[in-house]
Image (cartoon, grey):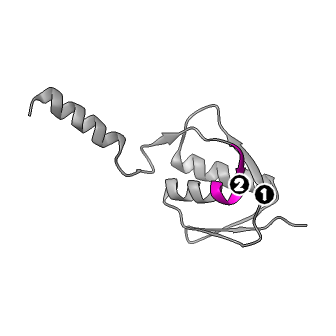
């Protein structure tokens, strides 16, 4: 295998490698997304276990103009959910998401 081929294969494997919290940056662009799907997607990206109350529903827009680390993504999502009135608790790294107050 040539060095050029090995470099290309290495670059491809890096592009599709498992997510590392400290190394990867993302730019969220969720418009009118189902809040449950947003929480599940961010949980999967960040490796965070999430428990979502069955009463959690609704649409959410969650965007950023600049890339953010996965840690920042998790924190920004929590802040956005709190802004919208959802209850969010972190219990030993597990996010518990509750329905909005009536």
Give the crowd class for mark 1: few <14, some 14-19, many >=20 residues within 10 Å. few
Q: Residue furthest left?
A: 1
Work out which quarter of the rendered image holds the C terminus and state it: bottom right
Q: Secondary structure at mark 1?
A: loop
Highlighted range, magenta: 31-38
Q: Secondary structure at mark 2?
A: strand
Against 79, is 57 above or below? below
Q: Residue at x 64, y 54 (%)?
A: 38
Give the crowd class for mark 2: few <14, some 14-19, many >=20 residues within 10 Å. some
The residue identified by callout 1 is 58
Q: Is residue 41 magenta?
A: no
The residue identified by callout 2 is 34
Q: Position of residue 44 (x, y in %)?
A: 51, 58
Q: Earlier in the sequence, mark 2 or mark 1?
A: 2
Q: Residue at x 73, y 50 (%)?
A: 80
Mark 2 → mark 1, Cα distance in angstroms? 6 Å
Q: Position of residue 84 (x, y in %)?
A: 81, 54
């Amino acid at each position: 295998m040539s060095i050029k081929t090995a470099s290309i294969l290495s670059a491809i494997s890096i592009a599709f490698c498992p997510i590392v919290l400290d190394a990867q940056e993302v730019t969220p662009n969720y418009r009118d997304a189902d809040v449950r799907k947003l929480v599940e997607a961010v949980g999967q990206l960040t490796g965070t276990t999430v428990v979502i109350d069955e009463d959690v529903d609704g649409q959410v827009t969650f965007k950023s103009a600049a890339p953010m680390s996965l840690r920042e993504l998790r924190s920004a999502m929590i802040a956005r959910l709190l802004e919208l009135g959802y209850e969010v608790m972190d219990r030993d790294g597990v996010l518990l998401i509750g329905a909005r107050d009536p």
